[in-house]
Amino acid sequence: MADIKITLAETRKPLPDPDTLVFGKTFTDHMFLMNYDAGQGWHDPRIVPYGPLSLEPSCMVFHYAQELFEGMKAYRTPEGKVQLFRPMENALRFDSSCERMCVPAIDPDFFVDAVKALVKVDQAWVPNKKGASLYIRPFVFATDPSLGVHASHSYLFVIILCPVGSYYAEGINPVKIYVEDVDVRAVRGGTGYTKCGGNYAASLRAGERAEEKGYSQVLWLDGVERKYIEEVGAMNVLFKIDGKVVTPALTGSVLPGITRKSCLELLRDWGVSVEERLISAQELFDAAESGKLEEAWGSGTAAVVSPIGELAMGDKVVTVNGGQIGRLTQRLYDTLTGIQWGKLPDTKGWIVPVCKG
């Protein structure tokens, strides 16, 4: 792969107040771009000033949704260093998504190098405030200006950066979850295990219905039998039932979350019994009604962990742990964020340094 060419912006935007950051609204001075053309492969990797992309109305991504993305973060340590959390896991998942969506593979090592290069250029944008970070959005999409259902012959790989405030600015408050029994997010054999936009578009209607009922997230069921739990909102989900942690198995319709993987590794290190298996909504509600459902939480890049305080399915409503965050959920949150922000030692080799700040 060619060296990354860097063209710096002539003028820099003022850095935002970290106390007023809103997720996904403010972007840094630069972006990474790289083109793919059949017969030439991936070429012309470059960092350029952030700005609009020029695409024709016939661009294939608008019509056939051949695209995918990743979500990751850069963190500033108390010493001012900037670091990433398990970026190779994102690169490998991106590679898996590319294979499913018929997008030419990008070397995982180069993926990480491109992320590091861009973050280093815009390192001043990594907030120096508790809980704040720099969100990283790599994505790729088909660019052929033509109609017709087939894989594109050209693509654009882009990385943009967005400073974000603390997900829990007012403390970690458990959320209310509604079990969705009409729409499904994905099915085995489909694209559920990839991070493609269509999965998220398919979730919007159910999310709006749940919000109208006063719930903040949807608990998704499998798309075949419509009884086994898969994910919560855009996160993986874990439950502590009768002393064991249970999480839906990765059957092909569930996104293999990096935070999920990290949670499971820590839990096993701590001697906690972990089961990755099918779990039905009925089993979950039975456990709640018998007092065996001790904790429940979602896991993902944005929130790290998101405790669940209430579950609803039809006319059934159950409270989890008195509506409070559980001890194990809190320990996972404290440990993961401690490693990410450099406040706890990285004994797992998960941290990749970017620069000294």
Image (tube, rainbow, N blue to C red):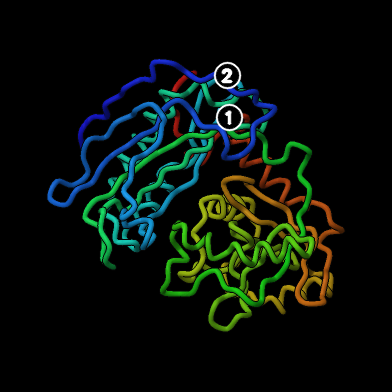
**Which residue is nearer to you in this view: 70 or 274?**
70
Question: Which residue bears the numbered disc 2?
Answer: 79
Residue 5 in which image quadrant: top left
**Residue drawn 53% across the image and 34% down it:** 162
Q: Position of residue 182 (x, y in %)?
A: 64, 77
Of the two numbered discs 1 and 2 on the same chain, state the one appearing first in sequence: 2
Q: Determine the residue positioned at 61% across, 42% down.
A: 336
Where disc 2 sits, the SS reads loop
In the rendered image, residue 38, in percent from the top left (x then y), is placed at 16, 52
Which circle marks residue 342 in the picture?
A: 1
Q: Can you name the residue that lies furthest to the left here? A: 39
Disc 1 marks a residue whose amino acid type is Gly
Mark 2 and mark 1 in contact (Cβ < 8 Å)?
Answer: yes
- Judge whether 217 appears above or below 285 on screen: above
The answer to which image quadrant residue 352 occupies is top left
C-alpha distance separating marks 1 and 2: 9 Å
> What percent of the width, then of the height, locates residue 84?
48, 35
* Residue 25 quadrant: top right
Q: Residues within 10 Å of mark 1 (few under 14, many from 20)?
A: many
Element under disc 1: loop
Q: Quadrant of the N terminus?
A: top left
Outermost residue on the front side: it is 57
Depth check: give the residue in front, 313 or 11.
11
Compared with 31, 59 (above or below) is below
Q: How many marks?
A: 2
